[in-house]
C-alpha cells in the first residue's frame, strides 16, 4: 500500500517550532554520547527526537526529526530511507546491538545516496540519553533566542526615542535582522530604507508584497512572505492609516525574527499615524514614551493635555471642549469583566471604552485578564456609573504618577464587586475618621502593625474583612477554596497575635490595611 505524500504547506502555516532548531553538529559534539556520523551530509537541523521500530514510520513523522531505531524490522534499507526523506526527517540514528552487531552496509549506502545523515549509536548510549541531550540543547537555544529578541526590542525602543525615529528604527531593524528594511507605500514608492541593497528582482518582488498588504481593504492580509533565491522577503501592514507597509529582505528567518519585526510594526504604526489633533498626538507620544520606559512623571504633561469626555449619562451636563481638560491632571483606573463571565473580545472592550469616554484601554487579549481602562477625571463631570452587562471596579482619582497603585486598587475593587454581586465598586479616598489621621502617620502605623504578614496574607485579610468575614464570598473574590481562606486567616491571627473575632481588632486592622 502506497501512502500519499504530506500535504503542501501554505504561507499561513507555521514553518518553525517555537524554539530554534538544534544543529546536528552540536549533538555530535557531546562526547559523552559517543555518536558518530557514518553517512550523509554533516549539516542538518533537528527539531525533535522520535523513536520507532516500524517498517515504515512515515505516517508518524512531522518533519525535522532525529529518528532513532535499532532496526528490528529493517528489511529494505532503500525503501526505508526513501520514506524517511519523503517525510522530512532530518537524520537517522541507528543503535547497534542487540539486534545488529554493526550498522547494515545497505543502510549506509542508502543514506549516502539519498542525502540523509546517519549516526551510529553505541550500545552504551540509551536512546533516552540522546533525547535528553537534544531537549537540553533546544532549551539552551531557546534561551539564547529570547536574549537576542530582548536585546533587539531594547535597541528598537531606544531608536524610537531618537529625534528622527522612523529612519532610526529602520536602521536598527535592518541591523538586528541582517538585511534590508524599507517603508513602502501601496503604490510601491520607497519612503525610507536602511540596510544592505537587494537585487532588482528581489526589490520588485518586495514591492509586490507591500502592495498586497498596504492597501487597507476588507479581507486584506496583515502580512505576506515570499522568497527570491536565498533571500527571504516579508511585508507587514502598518496601522497608521496611510497605506504603508514595512518590507524586509533577509538571508535568514529565525523563530524570533517575526517577534522583532512585530515590535517594529507597532512602533512604526505609532510613529507614522497621520492627521492627529494635538490631544491625540500628545497621548500617542505619551504611550510610546511609556512603552520605552519613560517615568510617568515625564509624560504627565502630555496626558494632561485633555482627552475624551466621560459619558455623562442621559440628561446630564456635558462640559464643552474648552472646559473639559482635567484641571488636576487626575485619572481613574477601571477594571471590568463581563457579567456573564465570558471573556471580552476587542469589539466589546472598545464599546465599553467608548461608553466611558476613553480610548485608553487594554482588552486583555481574550484571556482571563480583565479589561483595564484609563479614564481622565474632572471634578465637574458626572460620577462614574455602572454599565449594562459589565462588572466594574474603579480606583479613586490619582495623579498620573500613581497609576501603578491605582491599578492594584481597581483590581481589588473589581474583586469586591464580583464577590458582593454589585455592578460597580469604587475605591474611595479616605474620609470620616480615617481622614483625621495624617497620611504619613497612618502609613507608618500600618507598616508596623502588618509587618509580620506576607503580601498574599495581607490581601486575603483585607478581602475577608471587606466582606464581613464571609469565607465563601472571600473564596469567590480571591479564586481559591474556602478552606484556603480559613487557613490564611488563621495564619494571620497567629502571626499578628490578635483575636480576629474581636471587633476592635478588626477595626484597627481594616484601618491599617486601607493605608497599604
Image (cartoon, helix red, strand yellow):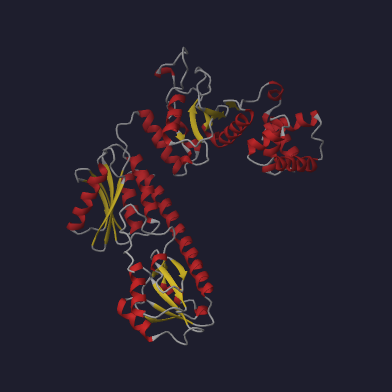
Residue 438 in the figure: left or right of residue 296: right
Residue 92 in the figure: left or right of residue 342: left
Q: Which image quadrant for residue 405?
A: top right
- Seen from the viewer's position, the closer of residues 194 and 40 is 40
* Image mark count: 0
Q: Picture coordinates of residue 387 (x, y %)? A: 50, 24
Q: Residue at x 46, y 61 (%)?
A: 142
- Asked if residue 413 is positioned above or below residue 455 in the image, the reply reads above
Residue 491 in the figure: left or right of residue 358: right
- Asked if residue 26 is positioned above or below residue 229 in the image, the reply reads below
Q: Residue furthest top?
A: 315
Q: Which image quadrant for residue 237?
A: top left
On-image quarter of the N terminus: bottom left
Q: Picture coordinates of residue 207 (x, y %)? A: 21, 50
Q: Residue at x 37, y 53 (%)?
A: 258
Q: Picture coordinates of residue 257 (x, y %)? A: 37, 56
Residue 63 visible in the current orientation: yes
- Seen from the viewer's position, the closer of residues 287 and 207 is 207
On-image quarter of the C terminus: top right
Residue 325 in the figure: left or right of residue 42: right
- Asked if residue 13 is positioned above or below residue 138 in the image, the reply reads above
Residue 116 visible in the current orientation: no
Q: Picture coordinates of residue 507 (x, y %)? A: 76, 29
- Seen from the viewer's position, the closer of residues 160 and 65 is 65
Amino acid at each position: 500500500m502506497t501512502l500519499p505524500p504530506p500535504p503542501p504547506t501554505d504561507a499561513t502555516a507555521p514553518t518553525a517550532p517555537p524554539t530554534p532548531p538544534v544543529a546536528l553538529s552540536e549533538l555530535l559534539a557531546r562526547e559523552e554520547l559517543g555518536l558518530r556520523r557514518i553517512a550523509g551530509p554533516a549539516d542538518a537541523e533537528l527539531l525533535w527526537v522520535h523513536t520507532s521500530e516500524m517498517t515504515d514510520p512515515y505516517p508518524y513523522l512531522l518533519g525535522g526529526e532525529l529518528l532513532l531505531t535499532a532496526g528490528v524490522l529493517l528489511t529494505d534499507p532503500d525503501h526505508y530511507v526513501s520514506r524517511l526523506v519523503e517525510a522530512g526527517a532530518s537524520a537517522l540514528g541507528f543503535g547497534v546491538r542487540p539486534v545488529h552487531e554493526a550498522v547494515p552496509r545497505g543502510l549506509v549506502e542508502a543514506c549516502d545516496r539519498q542525502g540523509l545523515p546517519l549516526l551510529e549509536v553505541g550500545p552504551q548510549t540509551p536512546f533516552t540519553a540522546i533525547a535528553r541531550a537534544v531537549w537540553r540543547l533546544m532549551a539552551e537555544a531557546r534561551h539564547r533566542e529570547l536574549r537576542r529578541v530582548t536585546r533587539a526590542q531594547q535597541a528598537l525602543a531606544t531608536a524610537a526615542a531618537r529625534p528622527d525615529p522612523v529612519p532610526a528604527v529602520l536602521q536598527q531593524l535592518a541591523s538586528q535582522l541582517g538585511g534590508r528594511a524599507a517603508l513602502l507605500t501601496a503604490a510601491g514608492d520607497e519612503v525610507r530604507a536602511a540596510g544592505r541593497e537587494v537585487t532588482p528582482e528581489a526589490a520588485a518582488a518586495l514591492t509586490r508584497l507591500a502592495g498586497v498588504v498596504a492597501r487597507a481593504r476588507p479581507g486584506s492580509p496583515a502580512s505576506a512572505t515570499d522568497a527570491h533565491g536565498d533571500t527571504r522577503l516579508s511585508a507587514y501592514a502598518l496601522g497608521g492609516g496611510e497605506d504603508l507597509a514595512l518590507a524586509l529582505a533577509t538571508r535568514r528567518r529565525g523563530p524570533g525574527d517575526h517577534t522583532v519585526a512585530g515590535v517594529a510594526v507597532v512602533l512604526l504604526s505609532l510613529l507614522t499615524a497621520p492627521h492627529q489633533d494635538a490631544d491625540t498626538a500628545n497621548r500617542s507620544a505619551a504611550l510610546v514614551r511609556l512603552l520605552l520606559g519613560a517615568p510617568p512623571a515625564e509624560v504627565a504633561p502630555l496626558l494632561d493635555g485633555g482627552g475624551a469626555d466621560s459619558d455623562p449619562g442621559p440628561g446630564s451636563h456635558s462640559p464643552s471642549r474648552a472646559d473639559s481638560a482635567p484641571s488636576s491632571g487626575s485619572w481613574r483606573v477601571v477594571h471590568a469583566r463581563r457579567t456573564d463571565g465570558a471573556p471580552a473580545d476587542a469589539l466589546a472592550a472598545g464599546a465599553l471604552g467608548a461608553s466611558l469616554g476613553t480610548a485608553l484601554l487594554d482588552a486583555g487579549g481574550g484571556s482571563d485578564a480583565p479589561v483595564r481602562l484609563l479614564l481622565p477625571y474632572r471634578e465637574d463631570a458626572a460620577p462614574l456609573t455602572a454599565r449594562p452587562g459589565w462588572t466594574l471596579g474603579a480606583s479613586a482619582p490619582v495623579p498620573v504618577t500613581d497609576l501603578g497603585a491605582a491599578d492594584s486598587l481597581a483590581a481589588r475593587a473589581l474583586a469586591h464587586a464580583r464577590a458582593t454581586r454589585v455592578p460597580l465598586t469604587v475605591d474611595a479616598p479616605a474620609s470620616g475618621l480615617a481622614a483625621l489621621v495624617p497620611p504619613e502617620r497612618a502609613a507608618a502605623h500600618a507598616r508596623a502593625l502588618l509587618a509580620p504578614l506576607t503580601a498574599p496574607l495581607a490581601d486575603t485579610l483585607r478581602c475577608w474583612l471587606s466582606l464581613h468575614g464571609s469565607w465563601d464570598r472571600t473564596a469567590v473574590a480571591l479564586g481559591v477554596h474556602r478552606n484556603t481562606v480559613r487557613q490564611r486567616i488563621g495564619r494571620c491571627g497567629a502571626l499578628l497575635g490578635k483575636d480576629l473575632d474581636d471587633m476592635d481588632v478588626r477595626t484597627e486592622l481594616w484601618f491599617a490595611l486601607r493605608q497599604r
